[in-house]
Image (tube, rainbow, N blue to C red):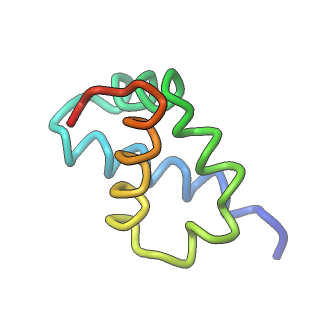
């Protein structure tokens, strides 16, 4: 199976993040990229994909906030 689902999973997380904050998908990607959220999803995919997307978004909020993000 490998990681063929990693990119679709990251895409789903970005879209869920955008929906949660009522921002565009492009703005969500930029925010997550700038504050290391994309790297977090990539590095911890093996753990994060076992949780719900909502839980992953919650984790992204905390992780990005710890890296200087201020959406919350």
User: Image check: 22 left or right of 51?
Assistant: left
Q: Residue at x 75, y 62 (%)?
A: 4
Q: Quadrant of residue 61?
A: top left
Give the residue at the far front of this rendering. Answer: 66
How many numbered marks, from 0 up? 0
Can you say whether 53 is above or below 1 in the image? above
Residue 25 rendering spot, x and y as whole percentages: 34, 32
User: Image check: 40 left or right of 18?
Assistant: right
Q: Quadrant of residue 45?
A: bottom right
- Image quadrant occupied by the N terminus: bottom right
Q: Residue at x 48, y 30 (%)?
A: 67
Q: Quadrant of residue 12?
A: bottom left
Residue 70 rendering spot, x and y as whole percentages: 28, 26
Q: Residue at x 21, y 30 (%)?
A: 23
Give the residue at the far right of this rendering. Answer: 2
Q: Nearer the viewer, residue 18 or 43?
A: 43
Can you say whether 34 is above or below 38 in the image? above
Q: Nearer the viewer, residue 16 or 33?
A: 33
Residue 18 rendering spot, x and y as whole percentages: 28, 40
- Image quadrant occupied by the C terminus: top left
User: Image check: 62 left or right of 40?
Assistant: left
């Amino acid at each position: 199976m490998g990681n063929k689902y990693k990119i679709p999973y990251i895409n789903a997380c970005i879209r869920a993040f955008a929906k949660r904050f009522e921002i565009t998908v492009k703005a969500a990607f930029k925010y997550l990229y700038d504050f290391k959220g994309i790297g977090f999803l990539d590095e911890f995919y093996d753990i994060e994909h076992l949780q719900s997307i909502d839980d992953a978004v919650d984790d992204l909020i905390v992780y990005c906030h710890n890296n200087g993000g201020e959406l919350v």
